[in-house]
Amino acid sequence: MKLYEKLARDIEGQILKGVYRDGERLQSVRETSRQRQVSITTVLRAYLLLESRGLIKSRPQSGFYVTPPAGERAPAGGQADTARPIAISSPVDVSRLVLSTLRTISQGHAIPLGSPYPDPAGFAFDKLGRYAHAASKDASLNELRNALPPGHPQLLRQIVRRHLDQGLVVDPAEPIVTVGATEAINLCLQAVARPGDVIAVETPTFYAMLHAIERMGMKVVEVPTDPELGIDVDMLARLARELPIAACMVMPNFQNPLGFRMPDERKAALVRLATERDMPIIENGVCNELYYGDTPPGTLKAHDTKGLVLHCSSFSKTLTSVYRIGWALPGRYRDQVEKLKFLNTLTTPAIPQLAIAEYLERDGYDHRLRRMRKAYAQQAGLMRHAVHRWFPEGTRTSNPQGGYVLWVELPAPIDGMEIYQRALERGITVGPGYMFSVSDSYRNFIRLNYSSPWSREVEQAVATVGKIAASALRARR
Amino acid sequence: MKLYEKLARDIEGQILKGVYRDGERLQSVRETSRQRQVSITTVLRAYLLLESRGLIKSRPQSGFYVTPPAGERAPAGGQADTARPIAISSPVDVSRLVLSTLRTISQGHAIPLGSPYPDPAGFAFDKLGRYAHAASKDASLNELRNALPPGHPQLLRQIVRRHLDQGLVVDPAEPIVTVGATEAINLCLQAVARPGDVIAVETPTFYAMLHAIERMGMKVVEVPTDPELGIDVDMLARLARELPIAACMVMPNFQNPLGFRMPDERKAALVRLATERDMPIIENGVCNELYYGDTPPGTLKAHDTKGLVLHCSSFSKTLTSVYRIGWALPGRYRDQVEKLKFLNTLTTPAIPQLAIAEYLERDGYDHRLRRMRKAYAQQAGLMRHAVHRWFPEGTRTSNPQGGYVLWVELPAPIDGMEIYQRALERGITVGPGYMFSVSDSYRNFIRLNYSSPWSREVEQAVATVGKIAASALRARR
């Protein structure tokens, strides 16, 4: 039993014995940490575990409370219900804590430096809404049988065209529209590997990749990844000689959280390795259109001659995340992925597909993207500058070449979960580093989202987090 | 009172007065039409109304007869009630051929007697489109973090309310909105069982169930299912003593393809068995609101005291299938299902959720449902009658109590795939029986969709299929 599980069991015993009454506030994380001589992370994990079991409940800006009996709970739809964490029964499970952390990050009304999603302020909701309304009058779209996979022909054409504009020639019969890139990644992974298989990922890696692997009952091997050059291809080659690696999942451009743009020769080398070993690669390209330089980044897919690269992307980072429209270019696995799409969700709704296609055909998407890229590039600089100004000495940051997140390494003694917790008490979220690995390698890291237009409020939030980090560092020394 | 209702009342009076005796043949539809100077359709509707009340019964190629006492009735449908050897499938692989068949059925411009989907003519697309347009202006819905599982609070409330109206008390914190019932069924199955597990299903069963099982790498055992009473609970109990059955997937109301309404005491017995064995049941309730009688059918869930029933449903059969909005009531597996939803598609689009919620709150959904139920009940009778008129002697049909599909047993030498193929050449689709089982038990069965308003075109399509069947039978003899 892990330390936090033991602590959770102790506290559970106290609750059951009536040491705490219903509705009563537990000791703060810090008090418990001091009293029990265990780390903040351990206490937090214990509390989150108890929360996932429904025994306690966190309240924003306040602390953890013993859950009142069911009858006293807030009605459905109330903050209390929607904010409850996701519990998982399996003992070896990376996603339980991540999901409860994500939920806090995602649902609070706090300043969302921890959010994984782009600020929707730059999105063209009015126009999309009008196109969707027009599409809803297209009687042919009322027939489910006209909306089966692979997707709406007009959107499929736009997807192929946009890839072409970025230098990737796509067979018009290849793309399959999905419910966001999340579904695309899940389907592609299921198409290429089986339960028990080993999947190679970058480290740190975007947690959604880890969750997909966990869900399929697969195993993960984390491959060292350079913050500026991407996954270590030589190391991957060495690992692949020793381990039966069934597939590799990478995000070669503007990786979440590192932000690098993998150089073209490295991309070519990775695809060469995959070809030699007949090892499929799932390529996450969701940020490819958010590059800061003058030219769009290349893809792994462009180097692929054997149909081994399954490219996944979406419109969620650039156009709208709430329509949930993504796609897969599954290479030689196309038919399996299409079948899995059919089995998983039958079809992707047609009205939002057509609305996006119409928008792409007519409405200056490229102009909007240029503005978005310019703004994100500026905000990246402002965020880095603010972190270096307000965070304690020894803090290091990534140097994103695209996307909208900054990876921050705090001085080693600092625990990212403590920063997360204390920032949350001040109405600010950050993304704790532990979410990005199945190991404990990123304890002193946090991820910051800079997609919101820069403002005094954002600057102050960064300053607050910096001061929290400085005070945590002082306390540890 | 409509003309056919008046005619039905007259004939009912004659039957009650003893003008016709039990088992006696009524005047033919044509004779009555000529004699009463009313249309064929009016006579048919009157006869079907009487049939739906159990007063008369049609016999293939013969006519309508005053109903004999219950003991003499022949079961409609398959050989399912005859004991046949039970085989556990190796991990199922039914879907490839089924999917290509479904694709043909679904995408053609043929007359869609084979379609699994309801005719959308009865759906309220205009109003839904307007609500969706209004919802698209709700800025809070542009934030993905406001749309995470379990779903939009307003829709969750409506789901709970509708279940209440049908006699099922649901904890407001239980429902999880999904991308159609398809996603709900997949997530529920993954929550309760693991690869290699054995899952019990009805036979014939809705192929989507078989696909979900196949996709998860599970095995299937098909349990004999009475065409009027549903799954054989005693047989399931016996099987469960011999086999490690991990879960059971059933559609107790208006099952696709049999159309039965499982009696309440049998539902209770099934849930008792599940409780005794701690065996979860996935209950497909997508047609529950399409009942033909006066009262909504009960659910397995209503009998469940242990959280073992995972009820899955959607708005796809009654309101719109293209919005792809379904839900799960996962009982004690709620938290796992919510987590899996998050991992599978992150979130269900919020705009269609809110549009449906607004529609349900304001726009006479119940009125529309009543009309739909009445139309489907009539069309069921018309379709049965047309089949008995046009298909070769020895053809038997199910007697649907709800929904919109008819299960047709052709004389044994006929191959449903041959009918499917030859009908397709004539621009008509039918659903071949082989799709509904992992065995070859339903080779001589087809499923017909009668959700479209009855028309000369539909009648002619049925006649054409009947003639194809007759010629196939002659060729086999």
Image (spheres, coloured by chain):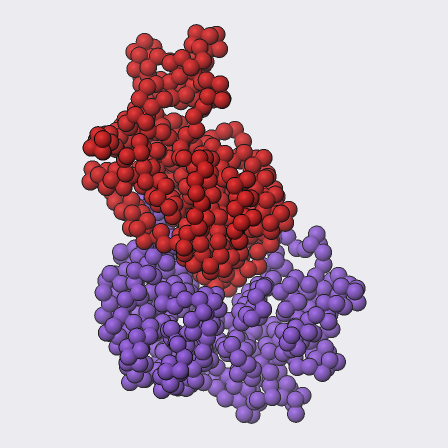
Chain colours: A purple, B red
Position of the N terminus of chain B, as image quadrant, is top left
Quarter of the figure with residue A45: bottom right
Quarter of the figure with residue B471: top left
Left or right of residue A396: residue A356: left
**Residue at 72% over, 64% down:** A66
The answer to whether residue B393 is visible is yes
Residue A333 in picture, x, y percent from top left: 30, 65
Tell me: residue A13, above or below residue A243. above
Left or right of residue B259: residue A29: right
**Residue at 54% over, 34% down:** B263
Left or right of residue A375: residue A44: right
Position of the C terminus of chain B, as image quadrant, is top left
Tell me: residue B120, above or below residue B307. above
Residue B339 in picture, x, y percent from top left: 53, 62
Tell me: residue B376, above or below residue B68. below
> B414 and B177: which one is in front?
B414
Residue A210 in picture, x, y percent from top left: 47, 72
**Residue at 36% over, 78% down:** A252
Residue A34 in picture, x, y percent from top left: 72, 82
> A243 and A209: which one is in front?
A243
**Residue at 56% over, 36% down:** B266
> B83 and A385: which one is in front?
B83
Q: How many marks?
A: 0
The answer to whether residue A423 is visible is no
Tell me: residue B450, above or below residue A142. above
